[in-house]
Amino acid sequence: MTIRVLVADDQEAAREALRLILDGEPDIDVIATAADGAEAVHQALSRRPDVVVMDLRMPGMDGIAAIGRLAAAESAPRMLALTTFDLDEYLFGALRAGAAGFLLKDSDPDVLVAAVRELHQGRGLIDPQVTGRLISRFAALSPSPATPELDLLTPREHHVLRLLARGLSNGEIAAACTIEEGTVKTHVNRILTKLGLRTRVHAAIYAYEHGIVTRAAP
Protein backbone atom coordinates (compact mmCIF):
# COMPACT_ATOMS: atom_id res chain seq x y z
CA MET A 1 0.00 0.00 0.00
CA THR A 2 1.32 3.44 -0.96
CA ILE A 3 1.42 6.05 1.81
CA ARG A 4 -0.07 9.32 0.56
CA VAL A 5 1.79 12.29 2.07
CA LEU A 6 1.28 16.05 2.18
CA VAL A 7 4.33 18.21 2.94
CA ALA A 8 3.83 21.70 4.41
CA ASP A 9 6.75 24.11 4.82
CA ASP A 10 6.97 27.83 4.05
CA GLN A 11 10.54 27.56 2.73
CA GLU A 12 10.56 26.31 -0.86
CA ALA A 13 14.01 24.69 -0.57
CA ALA A 14 13.03 22.78 2.57
CA ARG A 15 9.70 21.78 1.05
CA GLU A 16 11.41 20.43 -2.05
CA ALA A 17 14.04 18.59 0.00
CA LEU A 18 11.34 16.87 2.05
CA ARG A 19 9.44 15.98 -1.11
CA LEU A 20 12.52 14.46 -2.74
CA ILE A 21 13.40 12.41 0.35
CA LEU A 22 9.92 10.97 0.71
CA ASP A 23 9.10 10.57 -2.98
CA GLY A 24 12.29 8.55 -3.37
CA GLU A 25 10.76 5.73 -1.33
CA PRO A 26 8.83 3.06 -3.25
CA ASP A 27 5.96 2.99 -0.73
CA ILE A 28 5.54 6.77 -0.30
CA ASP A 29 3.87 9.24 -2.66
CA VAL A 30 3.92 12.99 -1.95
CA ILE A 31 0.56 13.95 -3.41
CA ALA A 32 0.68 17.67 -2.53
CA THR A 33 2.74 20.42 -0.91
CA ALA A 34 1.73 23.60 0.93
CA ALA A 35 3.53 26.83 1.83
CA ASP A 36 1.49 27.76 4.92
CA GLY A 37 -0.95 26.33 7.43
CA ALA A 38 -4.11 27.50 5.69
CA GLU A 39 -3.04 25.93 2.40
CA ALA A 40 -2.06 22.75 4.25
CA VAL A 41 -5.53 22.48 5.78
CA HIS A 42 -7.21 23.10 2.42
CA GLN A 43 -5.01 20.58 0.60
CA ALA A 44 -5.40 17.95 3.32
CA LEU A 45 -9.19 18.22 3.38
CA SER A 46 -9.43 18.01 -0.41
CA ARG A 47 -6.67 15.50 -1.19
CA ARG A 48 -7.06 13.26 1.89
CA PRO A 49 -3.41 12.26 2.55
CA ASP A 50 -2.61 9.49 5.00
CA VAL A 51 0.17 11.49 6.66
CA VAL A 52 0.86 15.25 6.83
CA VAL A 53 4.44 16.39 7.43
CA MET A 54 3.94 19.83 8.97
CA ASP A 55 6.48 22.56 9.66
CA LEU A 56 5.41 24.40 12.82
CA ARG A 57 6.73 27.90 12.03
CA MET A 58 4.86 29.26 9.01
CA PRO A 59 3.31 32.67 8.24
CA GLY A 60 -0.39 33.24 8.71
CA MET A 61 -1.82 30.06 10.18
CA ASP A 62 1.10 28.27 11.80
CA GLY A 63 1.63 24.53 11.91
CA ILE A 64 0.20 24.05 15.41
CA ALA A 65 -3.05 25.78 14.45
CA ALA A 66 -3.23 23.76 11.22
CA ILE A 67 -2.68 20.51 13.14
CA GLY A 68 -5.52 21.44 15.49
CA ARG A 69 -7.86 22.12 12.56
CA LEU A 70 -7.05 18.82 10.89
CA ALA A 71 -7.20 16.81 14.12
CA ALA A 72 -10.82 17.93 14.50
CA ALA A 73 -11.74 16.85 10.98
CA GLU A 74 -13.48 13.59 10.14
CA SER A 75 -10.98 10.88 9.15
CA ALA A 76 -8.08 13.11 10.19
CA PRO A 77 -4.66 12.25 8.74
CA ARG A 78 -1.73 11.33 10.95
CA MET A 79 0.39 14.41 11.50
CA LEU A 80 4.15 14.63 11.92
CA ALA A 81 5.36 17.96 13.31
CA LEU A 82 8.75 19.28 12.17
CA THR A 83 10.68 22.21 13.62
CA THR A 84 14.18 23.65 13.51
CA PHE A 85 13.77 24.99 17.04
CA ASP A 86 14.07 22.58 19.94
CA LEU A 87 11.63 24.52 22.13
CA ASP A 88 9.07 23.14 24.57
CA GLU A 89 6.33 25.47 23.35
CA TYR A 90 6.45 23.84 19.91
CA LEU A 91 6.79 20.29 21.21
CA PHE A 92 3.88 20.47 23.67
CA GLY A 93 1.77 22.68 21.44
CA ALA A 94 2.03 20.24 18.54
CA LEU A 95 1.29 17.16 20.63
CA ARG A 96 -1.64 18.78 22.41
CA ALA A 97 -3.05 19.97 19.07
CA GLY A 98 -3.12 16.40 17.79
CA ALA A 99 0.25 15.59 16.22
CA ALA A 100 1.14 11.90 16.40
CA GLY A 101 4.87 12.55 16.02
CA PHE A 102 7.51 15.23 16.46
CA LEU A 103 10.90 15.46 14.76
CA LEU A 104 13.63 18.07 14.56
CA LYS A 105 14.40 19.17 11.02
CA ASP A 106 18.02 18.10 11.30
CA SER A 107 17.00 14.47 11.82
CA ASP A 108 18.50 12.01 9.34
CA PRO A 109 16.41 11.37 6.21
CA ASP A 110 16.09 7.72 7.25
CA VAL A 111 14.50 8.84 10.53
CA LEU A 112 12.00 11.00 8.64
CA VAL A 113 11.04 8.13 6.35
CA ALA A 114 10.72 5.74 9.28
CA ALA A 115 8.54 8.26 11.14
CA VAL A 116 6.13 8.56 8.21
CA ARG A 117 5.82 4.77 8.09
CA GLU A 118 5.34 4.55 11.87
CA LEU A 119 2.55 7.12 11.81
CA HIS A 120 0.87 5.39 8.90
CA GLN A 121 0.84 2.19 10.94
CA GLY A 122 -0.97 4.00 13.73
CA ARG A 123 2.03 4.48 15.97
CA GLY A 124 3.48 7.71 17.31
CA LEU A 125 7.10 8.84 17.32
CA ILE A 126 9.00 11.50 19.25
CA ASP A 127 12.53 12.55 18.32
CA PRO A 128 14.90 10.80 20.77
CA GLN A 129 16.63 14.15 21.36
CA VAL A 130 13.54 15.54 23.09
CA THR A 131 11.90 12.43 24.61
CA GLY A 132 13.67 12.81 27.95
CA ARG A 133 12.57 16.40 28.34
CA LEU A 134 9.03 15.49 27.37
CA ILE A 135 8.90 12.94 30.18
CA SER A 136 10.46 15.36 32.68
CA ARG A 137 8.05 18.14 31.77
CA PHE A 138 4.92 16.05 32.14
CA ALA A 139 6.22 14.32 35.25
CA ALA A 140 6.56 17.73 36.91
CA LEU A 141 2.92 18.65 36.35
CA SER A 142 0.36 18.37 39.11
CA PRO A 143 -1.86 15.45 38.12
CA SER A 144 -5.28 16.24 36.71
CA PRO A 145 -8.27 14.36 38.12
CA ALA A 146 -8.66 10.86 36.75
CA THR A 147 -11.21 10.50 33.97
CA PRO A 148 -14.06 7.96 34.14
CA GLU A 149 -12.50 6.10 31.20
CA LEU A 150 -9.56 5.17 33.40
CA ASP A 151 -11.83 2.81 35.39
CA LEU A 152 -12.35 0.81 32.20
CA LEU A 153 -8.72 -0.37 32.19
CA THR A 154 -7.89 -3.76 33.63
CA PRO A 155 -5.01 -4.10 36.14
CA ARG A 156 -2.84 -5.50 33.34
CA GLU A 157 -3.69 -2.55 31.08
CA HIS A 158 -2.80 -0.12 33.88
CA HIS A 159 0.59 -1.82 34.18
CA VAL A 160 1.19 -1.72 30.43
CA LEU A 161 0.23 1.97 30.34
CA ARG A 162 2.75 2.77 33.08
CA LEU A 163 5.52 0.95 31.24
CA LEU A 164 4.57 2.53 27.91
CA ALA A 165 4.67 5.99 29.50
CA ARG A 166 8.20 5.38 30.72
CA GLY A 167 9.34 4.85 27.14
CA LEU A 168 9.53 1.05 26.98
CA SER A 169 9.08 -0.59 23.59
CA ASN A 170 6.56 -3.38 23.01
CA GLY A 171 9.37 -5.91 23.27
CA GLU A 172 10.59 -4.48 26.57
CA ILE A 173 7.05 -4.40 27.95
CA ALA A 174 6.58 -8.03 26.91
CA ALA A 175 9.74 -9.02 28.76
CA ALA A 176 8.75 -7.07 31.88
CA CYS A 177 5.28 -8.63 31.96
CA THR A 178 6.38 -12.10 30.77
CA ILE A 179 3.89 -12.06 27.90
CA GLU A 180 4.11 -12.21 24.11
CA GLU A 181 4.81 -9.03 22.14
CA GLY A 182 1.59 -9.57 20.20
CA THR A 183 -0.31 -9.53 23.49
CA VAL A 184 1.30 -6.20 24.35
CA LYS A 185 0.06 -4.75 21.05
CA THR A 186 -3.44 -5.95 21.90
CA HIS A 187 -3.26 -4.32 25.34
CA VAL A 188 -1.99 -1.04 23.84
CA ASN A 189 -4.80 -0.99 21.26
CA ARG A 190 -7.38 -1.60 23.98
CA ILE A 191 -5.88 1.17 26.14
CA LEU A 192 -6.07 3.65 23.27
CA THR A 193 -9.65 2.65 22.49
CA LYS A 194 -10.85 2.85 26.10
CA LEU A 195 -9.17 6.21 26.75
CA GLY A 196 -10.19 7.67 23.39
CA LEU A 197 -6.58 8.32 22.36
CA ARG A 198 -4.98 8.09 18.93
CA THR A 199 -1.39 7.00 19.56
CA ARG A 200 0.91 5.65 22.27
CA VAL A 201 2.51 9.10 22.44
CA HIS A 202 -0.80 10.54 23.57
CA ALA A 203 -1.23 7.61 25.96
CA ALA A 204 2.11 8.48 27.57
CA ILE A 205 1.07 12.12 27.92
CA TYR A 206 -2.24 11.03 29.46
CA ALA A 207 -0.43 8.82 31.98
CA TYR A 208 1.74 11.68 33.21
CA GLU A 209 -1.03 14.28 33.18
CA HIS A 210 -3.28 12.09 35.31
CA GLY A 211 -0.67 10.88 37.77
CA ILE A 212 -0.71 7.24 36.62
CA VAL A 213 3.06 7.38 36.47
CA THR A 214 5.66 9.83 37.77
CA ARG A 215 9.29 10.22 36.85
CA ALA A 216 10.37 8.27 39.93
CA ALA A 217 7.79 5.54 39.55
CA PRO A 218 9.05 1.97 38.90
Image (cartoon, grey):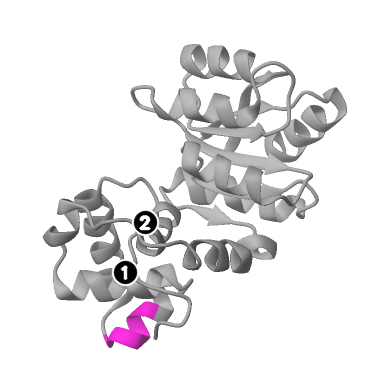
Q: Label 2 near label 1: C-beta < 8 Å? A: yes
Structural crowding at the residue carrying mark 1, measured as other residues with C-alpha within 10 Å and reported as few (<14), some (14–19) or many (≥20): some
Residue span colored magenta: 173-178
Structural crowding at the residue carrying mark 2, measured as other residues with C-alpha within 10 Å and reported as few (<14), some (14–19) or many (≥20): many
Q: Secondary structure at mark 2?
A: helix
Q: Quadrant of the C terminus?
A: bottom left
Q: Is residue 191 visible?
A: yes
Residue drawn at 22 percent across, 69 percent down = 157
Image position, residue 113 (x, y; %)? 65, 48
From the viewer's side, name the closer residue of 71 and 180.
71
Residue highlighted by disc 2: 206
Residue drawn at 62 percent across, 35 percent down = 53
Q: Main secondary structure of the magenta part?
A: helix
- As shown in the figure, which amino acid type bears the numbered disc 2? Tyr
Image position, residue 115 (x, y; %)? 59, 50
Residue drawn at 53 percent across, 66 percent down = 135
Residue highlighted by disc 1: 212
